[in-house]
Image: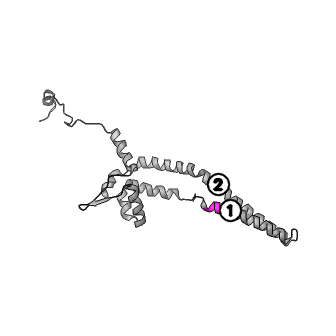
Amino acid sequence: MKYVNKYGFDDTKIKRLKELVRENLVKATLDQRKETDRLKKYINELTEKQTGIIKKNLDGIIPDNVLKQQLAMIDKELLNANASLAVMPNTETNYEEAVVFLEGYLKNPSAVWKDAKIGVKTKLQWFQFPQGLTFQNNFFGTTEMCSFFKVKDLALEAKSSNVDRTGLEPATPSLQMRCSTR
């Protein structure tokens, strides 16, 4: 697994990635957080309404049959609101913890792999090697690597300059003699 470390990211790239993750996760979950807050507020209002109706019944302001009807309607609304809240994605995820894990993984994938529990290792394996691994002649191999790691190679390739296979010395013999220290 140590060969995977060649895909590790440096601190400046990780810092920028962390900023982008935070920004985008906040944006992506804004509507969900608003809806979650709205549902929680609505549930509180219904609970207060329920308590108020019961108090009015106890004070003799509304009869038992009206109380029963009102409580049934409120219970139905509470059930629907709680069901909607239950299916909402968890917006209280600790993104900082996720970003710290991501940073460690991007810097040193093999160390994270080594220390991970089996369930995390399985997920990391499928993330890193989406086409799976093969085992042949005592070596693991794959035909496809995660595109996340390929991006780094593509970026480095684009920034690298091509050097002639003959090296830095001029290719013509007369210039070679003038430049050569041999």
Q: Nearer the viewer, mark 1 or mark 2?
A: 1
Quadrant holding the N terminus: bottom left
* 4 and 122: which is toward the camera: 122
Magenta span of residues: 81-86
- Of residue 135 and residue 38, the one placed in the foreground of this image is 135
Which type of secondary structure does the marked residue at label 2 adopt? helix
Specify the farthest residue to the right: 61
What residue is drawn where x is 67% and y is 60%? 40
Count residues near mark 2 (Cα–Cα under 10 Å), then give few for <14, some for 14-19, many for 20+: some
Q: Main secondary structure of the magenta part?
A: helix
**Is 153 in the magenta?**
no
Q: Which mark is residue 80?
A: 1
Question: In the rendering, at what x and y percent does residue 26 appear?
Answer: 56, 51
Three-letter residue code for mark 2: Glu
- Magenta region includes residue 84: yes
From the viewer's perspective, is 20 left or right of 113?
right
The answer to whether residue 69 is visible is yes
Residue 117 makes an appearance in the image: no
Amino acid type at image mark 1: Asn
CA neighbours of label 1 inside 10 A, class few (<14), some (14 to 19), many (20+): some
Occupied quadrant, residue 162: top left
Identity of the residue drawn at 38% across and 52% down: 146
Going 66% across and 57% down the picture, which residue do you hit?
Answer: 37
Residue wearing tag 2: 35
Which of the 4 image quadrants contains residue 154? top left
Q: Position of residue 167 (x, y in %)?
A: 20, 36
Which mark is on residue 128? none
Distance from disc 1 to disc 2, alpha carbons, whole Å, reads 14 Å
Drawn side of residue 107 relative to residue 55, left or right: left
